[in-house]
Amino acid sequence: MNVSQIFNRTFPSTLRFLRGYTRISGTEINPNMQKLEYAVRGPIVMRANEIEKCLLSGEKRPFDSIIRCNIGDCQNAGQLPISFIRQVIAVATDTELMDSSVIPEDAKLRALRFLKSVGGSVGCYSQSVGVEVVREDIADYIEQRDGIPSNPDDIFLASGASEAVKFILELVATTKEGSQRAGIMIPIPQYPLYSATISEYNNYQIGYYLEEETGWSLSETELEKRLEEAKAHCTPRVLVVINPGNPTGQVLTRENIESVLRFAHRHNLLVLADEVYQHNIYAPDRKFHSFKRVLHDLGGDIAKEVQLASMMSASKGFMGECGFRGGYCELVNFDPEVRAQLYKCLSARLCPPVLGQLTMNVVVNPPKPGEPSYEKFCTQKSNVLSDLAKKAKLVENLFNELPGYHSQPVMGAMYAFPRLELPPKAIQAAERAKLPVDTFYVTKLLEETGVCVVPGSGFNQKPGTYHFRTTILPTVERMQIMMERLGEFHMKFLNQYK
Amino acid sequence: MNVSQIFNRTFPSTLRFLRGYTRISGTEINPNMQKLEYAVRGPIVMRANEIEKCLLSGEKRPFDSIIRCNIGDCQNAGQLPISFIRQVIAVATDTELMDSSVIPEDAKLRALRFLKSVGGSVGCYSQSVGVEVVREDIADYIEQRDGIPSNPDDIFLASGASEAVKFILELVATTKEGSQRAGIMIPIPQYPLYSATISEYNNYQIGYYLEEETGWSLSETELEKRLEEAKAHCTPRVLVVINPGNPTGQVLTRENIESVLRFAHRHNLLVLADEVYQHNIYAPDRKFHSFKRVLHDLGGDIAKEVQLASMMSASKGFMGECGFRGGYCELVNFDPEVRAQLYKCLSARLCPPVLGQLTMNVVVNPPKPGEPSYEKFCTQKSNVLSDLAKKAKLVENLFNELPGYHSQPVMGAMYAFPRLELPPKAIQAAERAKLPVDTFYVTKLLEETGVCVVPGSGFNQKPGTYHFRTTILPTVERMQIMMERLGEFHMKFLNQYK
């Protein structure tokens, strides 16, 4: 024990001023924030940044560049933005461009319509729930997608889907002393925003395993079992489902969604459906079924009762406009008083980024046939999506050719999550290095090849299994280089630890 | 007691499923969120929106339009954006404009420099703490402003200053059961973001009164007194100071800031300096003194020890770009471990809006003499600021001409906060209407004149005093109309309740 620790034990905190001013230390901050972890931007990524700086300063390595497959940042990986989105935003921002022939007429009309609804300038605050025409267009988009009504008043915009998720998980938190914590069921593996937000609001995490062998599907038996176990520790309130899946790339069948909704109904759970990858479906035998539509089709009490919050984003899909921070949430079957309380809380953050809202607006209301930008928009969109489909298949196939690799089909989203069988000697080496086995593997991969992926432990996984998540975002050519580097590394690794 | 209440009493919550699915009700949500209030967008503003809709649909009223003086939304009130900011953003967004002569060359160079630092596209995620060149430019700006060093690693960008404030107040929260809540000292009157965020993170609010008679200055005696009273209920950790003041329009003297910093040092308080109005100084005898500079000049232990978090925004000043959600926070004297924990938490929200960061970038690094956009930029900036100075004087003078009105000098920021002496009969009428007296007054003002201001009770005020906050943002002409409507209303009001 050092002097300061002895001092802290000896003197109660009310006497601290005798020592003069003391700064807040790392152990004195909000314990929820201490607990919070977010692997997608964790230590591996920081190390990748360091190596990149070394490379730029001329240091020699067996590779010439970092290939970033750690984060769903489409444009950073080389994807080009959709021109129409950018044109609308440019002219809405600098209205002197209304006179310029560089901007197509339909982009100008879009910008004008939006400006009218936001006080005449993108520099104004919008309504806290978001610009009215945007919420109307989102409701139309949902109606067209699902064939059932959607109410703009049940939709709120957010700074990316992440912010919307945070608001819902904050809303259900039971912060009163002595009361049981709110239980949030999340898939394992999961997107670490969920575990981070559960920590932040001191909710109780109830992990349920996805079934890797059946393409990462959800099992009702597993859900029942985990819920039952958790009841002693919390009051279960929310079931989170990510479809299409992150990090798994799965796309749920309609039957699977139905069984999940019945389960939620039986147990009074609010369903948080993370559907931000709804445009990213690659498996020819799968399609996107929205939770809202499946809920509606179930009919009866279930359709009228189950509370659903569905998330969508401008950062993923074919647009990949992460930097604009656009996203929305649709509330279904919420108590009006709860919705009012939530909207009141939204007002304290004033409003989501106005141009993120405009991005979302174009995504849900793209150019129509006959409009000047229609053809180009469709071509750009389908190019991005067909490239992603190509890479999904490429990655899945190449992984499954490597000894010890097992990849489920990459049906959707933007990720593969292969399972690794590693030799006992590698596992011992990881133990000696005091690293989780998958972290050991991907750290060596990064150091030796410059390929940056995120270890499965950052997403959570079944004990004794090892995975990593890679995006499929680099261009087809870069993705091929990445797989070559990885294949070579893997064979060397197996040889080293055989 | 109705049937459902009887049921709830009779059956424990584990048996609830017998009733079938029950939605979360308004009383079951996070109690911190139930408590949260944010007056700037409260009931008065909703009523103003309703009246506006009626006017637009042709309904007749004694006035033809709502004059919104409730929120610091510059451009909504008619202020024009600064061209250079918009040009940089437009060309960074739609890079095809790089070939267009409509965009000046210096705007293009700015955009290119920024793009290089953010992965080549404004659609990329930035670093969680913000784009590197932006943090570097902010550090330069602070160095020039204060004449002392600033480290880009101590600066993080946020979605407006509001988000930065929320992170700091979340960081100090003591969420462990049984531990005393963190005490946050805030001025009364205050900007309601603070009381809302204190509720959200279950901190303990320690209000200290500003001295209206001395131009809303801070009194060390008052601070000591309130801190002493609060110690039984909380562990005081943060002192919030808003300078220039919101809603008061005060600008603190250097001596006043010095005494505040000494007080903070004596009591181990982290100082949260809300300095978002640092460009908005109108009183000829006042200037802006940053807390950082005054802290430095105090020297000795104080300068080395007091933790300071200073906030700045792209939403106020001369630019008023609220919709872009740009803001930053500089940390001074923070424990490196605490900074690391905070930055870890920032990563879970991925990044602040990239174009908000670009807006902030131009604000801290405006065009230089000799660059093509320099002259225009300076003219636009000084026009906005001189108009604001004109309106600050106008409003103060006109208020003080009205019987029963007392306005302190509007030295800075964008608000006046006059005190009202109202006749006993008006106070009785408010009691009969079950409304706070100031709410009663401003509700009548809105209904009869269309002028929308926020009652003092939304900001808190000394018991028995009545105020409201008005912005000085409408154009000079509109502001004159507003004051005419208000003057007429007030005389009628006095007559009615004499």
Image (tube, coloured by chain):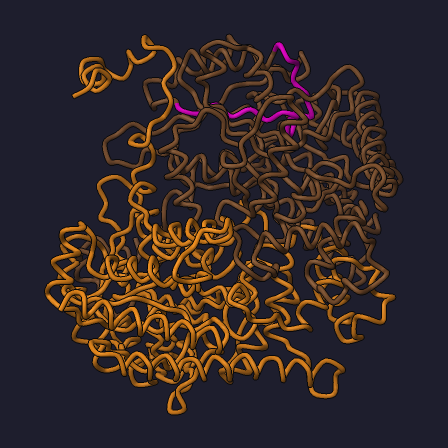
Chain colours: A orange, B brown
User: As rendered, which of A82 and A327 lies closer to the eye?
Assistant: A82
User: As rendered, which of B455 and B150 lies closer to the eye?
Assistant: B150
Q: Position of residue A29 (x, y in %)?
A: 34, 33
Q: Position of residue B161 (x, y in %)?
A: 57, 39
Residue A331 vertical position relative to residue A284 in the rendered view, above or below:
above
Residue A306 vertical position relative to residue B351 in the rendered view, above or below:
below
**Quadrant the N terminus of chain A occupies:** top left
Residue B132 vertical position relative to residue A356 in the rendered view, above or below:
above
Q: Is residue A230 left or right of residue B421?
A: left
Give the residues drawn in magenta, as a range. Answer: B237-255
| Magenta segment includes B246 | yes
Q: Residue at x 22, y 48 (%)?
A: A180
Most distant residue in the bottom direction: A285
| Magenta segment includes B172 | no
Q: Residue at x 50, y 41 (%)?
A: B37
| Residue B22 visible to the viewer | no
Q: Is residue A366 left or right of residue A303?
A: right
Q: Quadrant of residue B24?
A: bottom left
**Quadrant the C terminus of chain A occupies:** bottom left
